Amino acid sequence: MILVTGGRGAVATHLLTLLVEAGRPVRVASSDPGRLRVPDGVTAVTCDLRAPATFPAALDGVTEVFLYAEPSHIAEFADAAVTAGVEHVVLLSSSGVLEPGAAGDPLAASHLDVETALLAAPLTTTILRPGSFAGNAGAWAWPIRAGRPVSLPYPGSHTDPIHERDLAEVAFTVLTEPRHQGRHLHLTGPESLTFTEQIERLTEITGRPVTVGHVTREEWKQEMADYIPGPYADALLDYWQANDGRPVLLTDTVEQVTGHAPRTFATWVRDHVADFAG
């Protein structure tokens, strides 16, 4: 039995579909399973990664887990997994752990804490370390629909946007092919793109004029204050500043694992064009 945590997430949703289509026994978990829409024959269970009391029931009878990186009770989760007889965990981490000074970066450190706890446990742990999610561009949907500028403090900063479907396919492969178990996989999209270039692709594909509002760091933090805690906002801003005008390193890991090249950012936009419609 495979347990997929974070059942409302984009990666988990696609992964669940792949597992069901392949006939794999799977259970999907969420802190609020009543909000999940699951395929026939799949059980939705409560597993709140911030609430250890929910771990034992969710893990009962499970041998493999797809795990989102939540550090608050990761030691308890690892202990509960071992007790339940889990053999293999696939962790969705972040390539931020590979950066110098990762332990001092609150975003990277939260993922690093989860990796460390799992690697210390008597479990086989496969770590997926994606760079930038293409889905991060979804944060621009509201201003684009409203005809307002997209606020960017570093329009020339590069990212390596990766499609959630590629992440789901990598996760599916490592869950179902033992030869990949235990690997640490740095995953990127096929292109290093600036935010400006991503906006250009959105304009071309959606047919909607999109403008960029070049804001200061503090102005952006104020806009995001209700959504991103200050220390995390500072970490993002520092990363964007470090990559302003500097292409990021790309890998061919998606192709090595899945057998096909990763999907482009333009493909992601086409898949989500309705999100940006007025």
Image: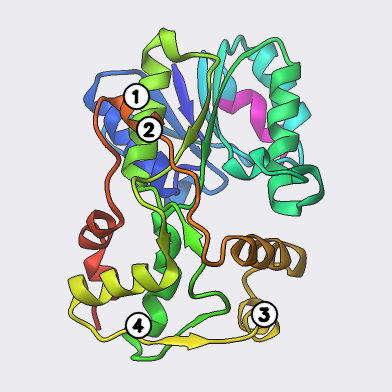
**Residue 19, how many percent across, how many down?**
31, 26
Which mark sits nearer the N-terminus, 3 or 4?
A: 4
Q: Amino acid at mark 4?
A: Ile
* Amino acid under disc 1: Gln
Find residue 80 and report its horizontal and vertical position in percent. 70, 21
Decide which of tag 4 and tag 2 comes sooner along the chain: 4
Q: Which residue is mark 3?
A: 217
Q: Which residue is mark 4?
A: 144
For disc 2, the marked residue is: 252
The structure residue drawn at horizontal position 70% and vertical position 34%, both measured from the top left corner, is 114
Q: CA distance from mark 2 to mark 1?
A: 6 Å
- Tell me, yes or no, whether the two marked residues, 3 and 1, touch with CB atoms within 8 Å: no
Q: Quadrant of the C terminus?
A: bottom left
Query: Is residue 229 shown above or below 49?
Result: below
- Cβ atoms under marks 2 and 1 closer than 8 Å: yes
- Please report whichever mark, 3 or 1, sits nearer to the chain's N-terminal start: 3
Residue sitting at x 41%, y 84%:
143
Q: Which residues are magenta?
A: 50-58
Label 4 crowd bin: few (<14), some (14–19), many (20+), radius 10 Å: many
The picture quadrant where one finds residue 140 is bottom left
Q: Which mark is residue 256?
A: 1
Q: Is residue 57 magenta?
A: yes
Query: How crowded is the residue under tag 1: few (<14 C-alpha within 10 Å), some, or many (20+)?
Result: few
- Nearest to the observer: residue 222 or residue 44: 222
Q: Is disc 3 placed on a helix, strand or loop?
A: helix
Asked if the magenta segment contains residue 224, the reply would be: no
Q: Residues within 10 Å of mark 3 (few under 14, many from 20)?
A: some
* Real-space Cα separation, disc 4 to disc 1, in angstroms: 36 Å
Position of residue 251 measured from the top left corner of the image (x, y, whole percent) = 43, 36
The amino acid type of the residue labelled 2 equals Asp
